[in-house]
Amino acid sequence: MAAATLRRLPALGGRALGAGGRQGTGRPGSWLHSVAGGPGHTPRLEDWQRCGAVCLQRAATLSREKNPMESAFAQLLEQVELEKSLYSDHELQVFEDEEKIRWRQAEDYDSEEEEDVGQDIVTAQDLEDMWEQKLRQFRAADREQEADKKDDRSTLNRRLDEKLTLLVKEKVGDEEIWLLPQSEWKPGETMRQTAERTLSALSGRNELQAAFLGNAPAGFYKYKYPKAMRTSDTLGAKVFFFKALLVNGDLKARRKGDYVWVTKSELKDYLKPKYLRQVNRFIFDTAAMYP
Amino acid sequence: MSWIVRPVIGLIPRSVWNASVRYCHWRMSLLALRESLPMRAEPKKKKKVDPRREQAVRDRLRKRLKKLERVPPELIPIEDFITRTKFLDESRVRDPPKLPVEETERRALLMKEWSRYKQKEHEKEAEMIQSMIEAQQQALQELRLESEELYQAAIKRDQGLFPLELQGCSFTPPIANYEAPDGKYRDITKVYTQ
């Protein structure tokens, strides 16, 4: 689908790009590349470091609770369904039992006339009461986990009703910033392989098993290095995000404070604004969609 | 004369034979003896029409079998579409509820609100999908500007993606250290074969 849509886009004119031809023509501060600059423009071979990042998500294990609108409508549907239904065997049995009791308590009741006395030891109403009691005895596990009460974001066992994304704290330049785990591209591998390498570098052998969702990147972010880090070649980095679903395992090899599992609404507590804006384009969860 | 009736007449010597014929005046000829007894040791005379007739009979039977087999297989009944006769009983019909005007009003308004809610939900979902598609398109565009071969690798189909098995959601998490009670069940589903 991605390929089909790209064919419909106007042809990206300008320089022919062969393998290894990396000619960026970005003006400083511009978002998208401007192609084929003016006549006096001398093309500078600016290198942008390519990085592959992985957006690792743990899917929700619990379904979300109904919001007021949904519960009101569900209740209405149940009422209508009951009104339009037929009596079930159990309900008919309840009516029969009531009839019998009424008949027995009538004045002209003759106990000798009654047939099959032994058959109504357990009435349908008794059965109903027994079932009700059994239901009340059952205790389901809590939806809210301990980590939710303490607001401990570094564990996977929190917010089971939401999709959680992994964020790590890395040192870029002087400062430590929160971002999606990324690593530099090495020649000879595809971008997806870079992302897979990032994932395995996070956790060691076989700790985190994930299913990558396709070969195409889900998002893109471009940033310039702070002046101190800029060399003559590299101006900044271009990050390509790849989505992956967590299948098994947990992050244990890292230090406790270095990583968090967060929902979409909590991303803003960690990520820088521009980064957040790009990441929000492809990360969604149920709370964001169905308030 | 009982020894004459035995079928091993070929082993009887001539002298004995002639003697017996002279005394059996009711026997017309020598050969009549052989005809009167049921000779089971001798092979029956084969009629040439027999094998052809038998074959014809067999062919007719085979044709009849084929005709019977050509009948299309009986369709497996869908049990959900068959109304059981016990549910057509009149005693099962519920009395229609007597709803006050406010209740019917409330229901009508709730249905309308629901349709508005669902429409908004659909719009949000469409927006989400559109946003994801745009982000991906831009990423692919940038990747293409970077390097054509990386782009070509990115737009290839991922053959290892499907079949993808994911676990669905429940409303409450599993109970820790839960011991399910032992039990037996009898599976009474009807299995149809064609």
Image: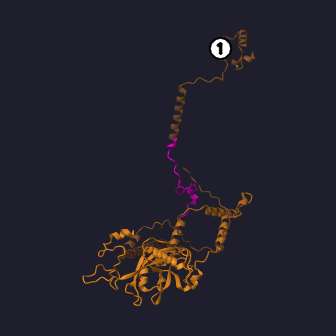
Chain colours: A orange, B brown
The one nearer the camera, A206 or B71, is A206
Q: Quadrant of the N terminus of chain B?
A: top right
Chain holding disc 1: B
Q: Which residue sits furthest left?
A: A39
Q: Give A204 or A175, whichever is nearer the viewer.
A: A204
Residue A23 can be seen in this image: yes
Q: Residue at x 30, y 78 (%)?
A: A35
Q: What span is in magenta?
A: B68-97
Q: Amino acid at mark 1?
A: Leu
Horizontal and vertical percent position of residue A7: 34, 69
Residue that appears at 71% across and 63% down: A121
**Residue B163 in the image: x percent, y percent?**
50, 65
Residue denoted by label 1: B31
Question: A82 or A150: nearer the eye?
Answer: A150
Q: Residue at x 58, y 77 (%)?
A: A143
The residue lying toward the viewer, choosing from A265 and B151, is B151
Q: Position of residue A275 (x, y in %)?
A: 42, 83
Near mark 1 (Cα within 10 A), the count class, few <14, some 14-19 or many ≥20, is few
Position of A91 relative to A145 (above/below): above
Report the side of A30 relative to A275 (left or right).
Answer: left
